[in-house]
Image: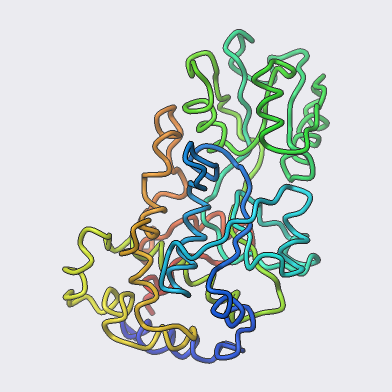
Amino acid sequence: MLGRSQFLGGALLILLATLPGASNADTLDRIKERGSVQCGVNRSGQGLSTVNAAGEWVGFFVDFCRAVAAATLKSASAVEFVELNQRTRFDATRDGAVDLFSANTTWTLTRDASMGLQFAATLYYDGQGFIAPTSLATKKLKDLKQATVCVTGNTTTENNLAEYIKVNRLDFKITTLTSNDSAVSAFLSRRCDLYTTDRLALAGLRAAGTSKPDDYVVFSEIISKEPLGPIVRSDDAAWFTIVKWVAFAMIAAEEKGVASTNLAHMRNSSDPEIRRLLGVDPGLGKALGLDEAWAARLIEQPRRCAEALGRANFRPAEAVGVTRGRCAFRRAPSDRGYTACSRGADIAGKVTESRILVAAKG
């Protein structure tokens, strides 16, 4: 019977080392030549992806772009952010205008199988919800006899809404907008009774996007499952692998309690998994075509990239009663270790447990 650390020290290292194209990653070569990661982003909302008062891109999905830059270019600031919208995001990624797209984009079978794209991981597992002004005086969607709903076009959100209305025979009128910002503006100006998108974005909107949060309510109904994560082109297996393992390393760092404040201490840890994660015991970096400190930089950089999966970007949501939910760490019933967002990964048909640190005993 293989122990957990034995499995990770042997089979996992072999798996990484034999992945195709690890030493000839065209995307990685271009990134190194350019000196920056070109990361597609959009304005998903407070805590997710937005531009602050200083003109800087900030948020959970933005921090993932910085994590990729830290791993590949040794600097979390070596990122060029390219703002994309719902209509341009997939073409720009597939055509190589950006190296990856990181936003609240839902992993679906159609997108995964027929668009020349690959979802690297599930970073957050959300669900579609609705927000309304409290003046609407209702606590349940189905209690509304009539309503107008604002939604962003060219999204799974739009499709989910149409299906929900049809299945439940609701007298709702859909107002489709071209961007998240325009949909939010239309809702706040009362062009619509309701606004629908992922619940984390709704919570951020209520907490930080309105002057009086108590004037708005996020309904308890969740009408979809939304595994959200970064996407890359499907024609570069080595680059896909790097982006995927950046996500896994971020999850692993939080699971093991490795943070920017204790990194020096953790380098002296006797835990073999932490030692591999930080490159003290070498091997994983070489398998990816990176140096051995690639994962440590996700933690020590000023942006504290690994901690992006922690609570900093979720505070606006938690302030209005939305927690990390399925994306909180938990111990599986079989005592296989902690997982993050594993249910979202299962829905998407992939496994996104942090396999640097999580393995079945057997």
In the displayed structure, would residue 46 be above or below residue 76?
Answer: above
Q: Which of 201 and 226 is in front in this view?
A: 201
In the displayed structure, would residue 144 be above or below residue 57?
Answer: above
Q: Nearer the viewer, residue 169 or 33?
A: 33
Q: Where is residue 277 in the image (x, y as percent from the top left)?
A: 33, 75
Is 292 left, or right, of 85 in this rendering? Answer: left
Q: Where is residue 344 in the image (x, y as percent from the top left)?
A: 56, 54
User: Which quarter of the picture shows residue 216?
Assistant: top right
Q: Give me the residue at 48% from left, 28% from top.
A: 208
Q: Position of residue 30 (x, y in %)?
A: 61, 79
Is 159 left, or right, of 40 in this rendering? Answer: right
Q: Give me the residue at 57% from left, 12% from top.
A: 134
Q: How many marks?
A: 0
User: Which quarter of the picture shows residue 184?
Assistant: top right
Image quadrant in which the C terminus is located: bottom left
Q: Give me the residue at 78% from left, 61% from top.
A: 91
Q: Give me the residue at 61% from left, 52% from top.
A: 41
Image quadrant in which the N terminus is located: bottom left
